[in-house]
Amino acid sequence: MNQSNTWEKVDQYITERLIPHDAVLEKALIANQQAGLPAYDVTPTQGKLLNLLAQMQGAKRILEIGTLGGYSTIWLARALPSGGQLVTLELDPVHAQVAAANLSLAQLSDMVELRVGDALEQLAQMDEEGVQPFDMIFIDADKPNNPNYLKWALHFSHPGTVIIGDNVIREGEIINEGSQDPRVQGVRQFYDLLAEEPKINATAIQTVGSKGYDGFVLGIVK
């Protein structure tokens, strides 16, 4: 059995043992596929990790930068208490339309605000609107802009806010300082900013699974 095949089988084992069958989440993934969305969704095990982290943090307000079809949005929103709110930002109107339908199916539309358009423009607009800080922020959008998203995440945080960044290992390419991939360079700059920024205390976790070799950054605002 090759290594990637083992990772996938282990992911399947964990999902079968610890994550109950969920028709809503499965229908969301099918809807995403049928709409031709890229298969960038988190895995079920990662989705549940996000859900548990939000519960552990006691998050009442969550910001998600990068909605895609709303699969991770559903996992995060389900962790919110009654009266909680999640704001999610998506560039592509087609992706947003699919996400809105998935959130409606999950009966989460009332607690999720889906904002469509360039994320940096949306974040600036939110600042003008006086949007209040968030308890948890999940960054999972275009990687070249990760440093800019982190700056905005810190702006919309308070002491104790948890900030999570996805896809920060990229099959180990992050150690290649000469990489010509703007996504790799964006993630490297993300690490540089985390290292230099005194307001946040962070680490990274490497992951393997059905989506290959990657990982998360986990940070808490001081």
Image: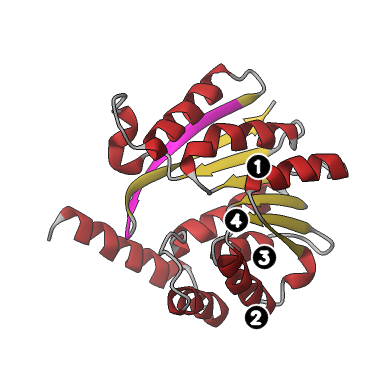
Q: Vertical placement of 29 versus 54: above or below?
A: below
Distance from the alpha carbon under mark 4 to that under mark 2: 21 Å
Residue 16: x, y in percent? 39, 72
Q: Vertical placement of 163 versus 20: above or below?
A: above
Residue ID for mark 4: 91
Left or right of 103, for residue 204? left
Residue type, label 4: Leu
Residue 192: x, y in percent? 49, 22
In primary-sequence order, the first of circles 3 and 1 is 3
Which element is circle 4 on? loop
Distance from the alpha carbon under mark 2 to that under mark 1: 28 Å
Q: Which mark is residue 9?
A: none
Question: Residue shown at 72%/43% (left/top)?
Answer: 123
Question: Residue shown at 83%/45% (left/top)?
Answer: 131
Quadrant position of the N terminus in the picture: bottom left
Distance from the alpha carbon under mark 3 to that under mark 1: 26 Å
Question: How crowded is the residue under tag 2: few (<14 C-alpha within 10 Å), some, or many (20+)?
Answer: some
Q: Which mark is residue 105?
A: 2
Q: Nearer the viewer, mark 2 or mark 1?
A: 1
Residue type, label 1: Leu
Residue ID for mark 3: 78
